[in-house]
Structures are given as C-alpha cells and as structure tokens.
Image (tube, coloured by chain):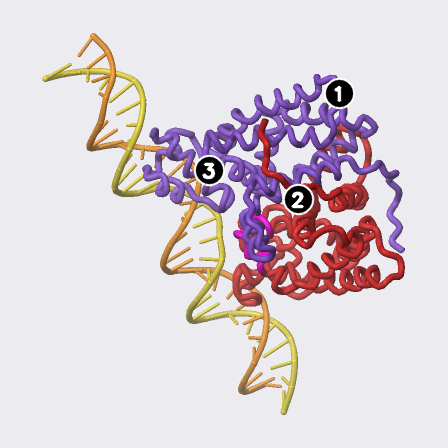
Chain colours: A purple, B red, C orange, D yellow
Amino acid sequence: MSTKNKILDAADVLFANKGFNGTSLREITSQANVNLAAVNYHFGSKKELIKAVMSRYMDELSPRLESALSLLCQAERKPTLHEVFSAFIEPLLHLNEFKENGTSTFLQLLGRGYTDSQGFLRWFLTTQYPNVFTNFTKAVNIAYPELSAEEIFWRLHFTMGTIVFTMSSSEALIDIAQNDFDNKLDIAGVIERVIPYVAAGVGAPITKIEPLSLG
Amino acid sequence: MSTKNKILDAADVLFANKGFNGTSLREITSQANVNLAAVNYHFGSKKELIKAVMSRYMDELSPRLESALSLLCQAERKPTLHEVFSAFIEPLLHLNEFKENGTSTFLQLLGRGYTDSQGFLRWFLTTQYPNVFTNFTKAVNIAYPELSAEEIFWRLHFTMGTIVFTMSSSEALIDIAQNDFDNKLDIAGVIERVIPYVAAGVGAPITKIEPLSLG
DNA sequence: CGCTATTTTAAACAGGTGTTTAAACTAGTT
DNA sequence: AACTAGTTTAAACACCTGTTTAAAATAGCG
C-alpha cells in the first residue's frame, strides 16, 4: 500500500476517535509506520490532510446520494419523508464496502468537523459539496411542500445534529444500550431507529412562532 | 471580582467558542487578567477547571429542572411530549439571569463535552447529576407509555444530539439564517423551533425494527 | 506594629506541536 | 553505468502546552 494511503487510513480512525485537534501527526505517522515528514511531503499540511480524509468519503458518497435523491424526486408518486431519509441508507452503508466501518468513521468525522476547528470543515463541505444540501432540500420540499424554506433550513440542521451527534458517540451508546437492555445491535440498527425519529421531526406540524411566555 | 470567578468567566466563553482542547490556560488567564499559575493554584488542574465551569451551570439547572419535571408528572392530566420539552425552557433561560449569555454557552459547552476529551465529561455529568436523566425518562414515559425503555433511551439521546449539536453551532446557524432569510432571531427563537421537532421525533410512531433491506 | 496565612508573581520546567531542512535512498530511463 | 526524479529519513527548528517552584506581595488578626 502506498504511503499516502497508509497515512489516510491511520488518520481516518485516529481523527474519528480523538478529534482533529486531539490527534498529532506523530500519532498518525507512527500508527501508519511512516516517517513523520511524510504528511507534509504528501499533503502539505495537517489541514490539507484533514480535507483529504473527508474528500475520500465525500467523493464516494456525493454522487450516490445525488442519484438516490433525484430518483426519488422524479418518481410519479410524491415521496414520504421516511423515504427521503431512507435514501441515505444505501449510500452511507456503501462506505463500508470501500472501507471497513466506513459509515461510522465518516459520521464521526462529520461530527468532529462541526465542533472542532471552529467550523472550517463545515465551510469546506458546504462550498466543495453544495449539491448534497440542495438536493436534500429539494427532496424535502417535494415531500412536505407546506414547509417554508426557513423551516426546512432549521429542521435539516436539527437532523444533521441528531445524526452526526448520535453517530459520533455511537460506540459508547451501543455499549450502554447492550448493557442496560441486553439487546444486540450495530450501526445499522441505530440507523433504523434514528430514521423514524428524524422523519417525524422534519414532518412535525407547523407551529406559529410567538414570543416566549415564561409563565 | 475574585480571581476564581474571573477565571471561570473567561474559561466559560473560551471553552464554548474553541473547545476544551482548543483553549490554553494562557488564553484563559490573559483574558481574565490573571497570572498563569492562578488556575493551578485555585483549581488544581485544567481538568478540574472544566468540571468547575460545568458544575456552576449544573448546580443551578439541576434542581429547577427536577422540580419542573416532577410538577408535570404529578399533575392530574397526562402531560404531552411538547409540554415535557417545554419544561426545559424556563430552567435553561434562567441561566441567562445568573450569567449573561448563560444559556447559549451552557449548551455549547455540553456539546463540547460530548465530543472533546473522549467522553470524560459525559461520565462526569451522568455520575454527578443522574437525576436529570432519570426524571426526564420518567416524564417521557408518562407522556408516551407505549414507548419501551429502550426506545426512550435511544430517542432521548437523539434529542440530546439535536439540542446540543444545534446549540453548539447556533451562532453560525443564526448568522446563515439571517443572511438567507432576512429574519431576525436569537437563541430563544431557535429553542422555539427545535421543540416541535424533538417532540415529534420522540413521539414518532413505533416501528418494528427489521433487518435492513438494501434493495 | 509584627506575625501569619493566603494569594500573586515571574521564571523555569519537561514535554509535545506542526513544519522545514538537507542528506540518504530508491526506482526508472537513457 | 550514470544521471534524474521521486521518495524517505533523521535531525533540528521555533513555538506552544500544562504544571511546578520559590520568591514577592497582600491581607487578616492579635
């Protein structure tokens, strides 16, 4: 395997588990059995390495997601919200084929990206892969036309939060759940559970926003 | 103001904005106009300072939340999920009185705590303030008795994710929303919007979990 | 005042960070 | 075999990290 890929693989799991700030280049290079300077030689800087790790996933995910959502939008029958969110399952689980546990690390990394590094990764994703957001918005708009653009904006970000946050701590949560409820489950099981939740959340009836009464 | 409080105030906003790992003691102490060694003198270590910052909020929040939820549980009429989540509003907004911008920083800090520092803060909160979780579970159980304990567990963590994640990036989101939709809003407005979402999510109909079909 | 206990201060500590350098090594090509 | 371009290597760079030290300053009290 090439040095570049060895670095990407090691950085992937370390970033997911310890965050971008929490992972040093020395940890990455020693995990990858590679010289320290190799990161700067092949990627230029740590920041560029972070981008490369994310791009590896996004380049695989983005087109699959786009086609799944546009298929849904072009269908005769209006899709349900549940179907819109289910459209994410196949592209996400496909990441597992091209890399073991790809789904979980990708979603963990996404969560890291939102909280670490003061949002530079959010900037990177929204500018480099804007289609993912616009396609998603379109699909939701078809499934629930009464929702205003602003409501969609907020509810989609709530959904991002639910997914990303859940997945970034999914290992710990699965551990707790298996202890407390004696019920075996994995990432796919968590996804099965979260979809009805976010579908119902996005599909919540529209409530007029009024000033808070703190009775 | 005492040195201890000057440090707590400075650490509060810096931790919220840049994360625990991303904030150095030198940033904190220079922001607080205090000598570097003061942190270790008054708190012992950076880790203890983090705990102190969180405890300041939790000690204020926990009893208010407990009484609000138990009031709801003891009422004759069965509460709705919307009411259960609304019970959080007053205790959360009360944090604003006891410290300026208290609400926003607290939820941001909560978000940091889940992703930074490999979950030591989650351990701290669940062991030091377990009532918050059990009371919440009880209230949801009354409002939606058909939900199994395991389903409640998952949906409450989904809700945590929604809230915490949204609030930890609330500033950025509010900025975007104001640009795109020309609609002034603040933290309270976001809370107004997120409650119908999470109430609908937790109240989603129960779906039999089956093995995924990836057709 | 003088004594004590608490607090503040500047300096140093040992170790970790991302990045750069220049020399060594490894193919591939003529 | 000799030259070249690409890659790897160990060492050093300058800077930042949390923590500790011992001296200086401050406050509280008899």
- Is A104 magenta? The answer is no
Residues at marks 1 and 2 touching, judged by CB atoms closer than 8 Å: no
The residue under label 1 is: A77
Tell me, yes or no, if residue B189 can be seen here.
Answer: no
Label 1 in the same subunit as label 2: no
Q: Quadrant of residue B9?
A: bottom right
Q: Residue at x 57, y 23 (%)?
A: A64
Q: Position of residue A15 (x, y in %)?
A: 48, 41
Which three-letter amino acid code belongs to the residue tagged 3?
Asp
Mark 3 to mark 2 CA distance (whole Å): 22 Å
Q: Secondary structure at mark 2?
A: helix
The residue under label 2 is: B165
Where is the C terminus of chain B found, in terms of image quarters? top right
Q: Quadrant of residue A160?
A: top right
Q: Which residues are magenta?
A: B114-123
Tell me, yes or no, if residue A160 can be seen here.
Answer: yes
Nearest the eye: A24 or B157? B157
Q: Secondary structure at mark 3?
A: helix
How many circles with numbers are drawn on the protein? 3
The residue under label 3 is: A12
Indicate which disc, 1 or 3, sits on the residue closer to the N terminus. 3
Which three-letter amino acid code belongs to the residue tagged 1?
Arg
Chain of the residue that carries numbered disc 1 in the rendered image: A
Q: Secondary structure at mark 1?
A: loop
Q: Residue at x 66, y 27 (%)?
A: A133
Query: Is B24 on the left or on the right of A147, as rendered?
Result: left
Q: Position of residue B142 (x, y in %)?
A: 79, 57
Q: Quadrant of residue C26?
A: top left
Which three-letter amino acid code belongs to the residue tagged 2?
Phe
